[in-house]
Image (cartoon, rainbow, N blue to C red):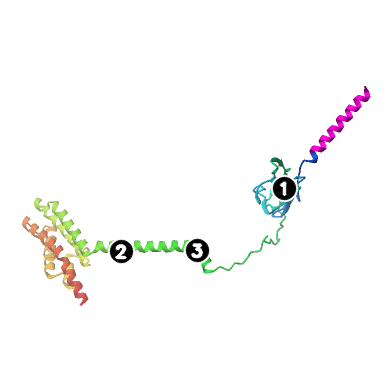
Amino acid sequence: MMIKNNSRILKNIFLFTFIFFSVFSNAQTLGSRLEKKTLALGEAVLFRVYISDLQGEEVVSAPKNELLPFHFEEVKDSIIVKPEFYERTIEFAVFEEGIFTLPALDFKIGGELYQTIPYEVEVINTAQKGDVINDIMKNKEVKLQVKDYWELYKWYILGVLILLALIFVIYQIIIYAKRRKDSPVVMTNQTLKDLDQLQKKKYIENGDYRSFYVELIDISRNFITKQYRIPADVLLTDDLIDVMKTNNTISQENEKVVEEIFLRGDLVKFAKTFPDQALMENDFENIRNFVKRSSKDLEFEKLRKDV
């Protein structure tokens, strides 16, 4: 009975051993190796992942230069694949001080997921005060052609040109608007509108001769200043009459109208005369006609200058 039990135990051990070696003799082996775990800042180091006993199985992992996480700057990533062997070698560097984790990385072998072991990497700054720092890569001198400069700065140049064109257009619009505003026709029409507004106030009908002449002369002074370029807005009446006669820009007919009404206006202002309704209406119409005739004065003056 003892012999039978021993024989059965030996048979079970043999069977287990056979199954164990049968399974693991056909299994793949995934391994990894990090060249150094303490690195200088920016130092390049090698990390290798290898798989043996592939038996023609396909290995799937992250694309080239995308296997390692953010802090690990990949310099080179190469893969060797053979029917029974797979090796991936990555050269990387870290450009920040501290301790960083290289996590477990996924590799699919024949559809089954495997992972590498994680590593901790310490990065230290070995530079000393006064050390000469050399670039990892030498700067390359590139000679730029005119086309290259155009590609670099074309949007800046176009932007400046558009801005200058916009400024020029705005300037021209302002000049045109100003000229139009100061043109004889515009000034004449504006003054006629001002006279119509004065008439609507019914100073003549109400016998308010002082307010009537004050506003009538103010409108006339403003008109002469802008239409004839004579500073009527600052000159006293006597001085203005002298300037008009010396200047010869205003016709004698218009000079006479301005002189009579302005002198009468001064007398009314200081209560030295009291005009009636008919006289005020006549002065109003004379000023209106003077404004309308002003364009002829300007045409004659222009012709005289051209000659």
Residue 142, x across and y down, in percent: 59, 67
Q: Identify which amino acid the numbered label 3 is placed on.
A: Tyr
Tell me the distance, in whole angstroms, between the alpha carbons under discs 3 and 2. 33 Å
Q: Residues within 10 Å of mark 2 (few under 14, many from 20)?
A: few
- Mark number displayed over residue 83: none
Residue that badge 1 annotates: 121
- Mark number displayed over residue 175: 2
Q: Identify which amino acid the numbered label 2 is placed on.
A: Ile
Residue that badge 3 annotates: 153
The quarter holding residue 20 reads: top right
Tell me whether the residue at label 1 lies in contact with that at label 3, contact meaning CB atoms closer than 8 angstroms.
Answer: no
Residue 44, x across and y down, in percent: 71, 55
Would you say residue 281 is visible in this rendering?
A: yes
Q: Identify which amino acid the numbered label 1 is placed on.
A: Val
Q: Residue at x 32, y 64 (%)?
A: 172
**If you read the primary sequence from the N terminus, does the residue marked by circle 1 or circle 3 appear first?**
1
The dominant secondary structure in magenta is helix
Q: Secondary structure at mark 3?
A: helix
Q: Secondary structure at mark 1?
A: strand
User: Which of 162/95 is in front?
Assistant: 162
Q: Exactly how many numbered labels are in the figure?
A: 3
Q: Residues within 10 Å of mark 1 (few under 14, many from 20)?
A: some
User: Which of 287/135 is in front?
Assistant: 135
Magenta region: 1-23
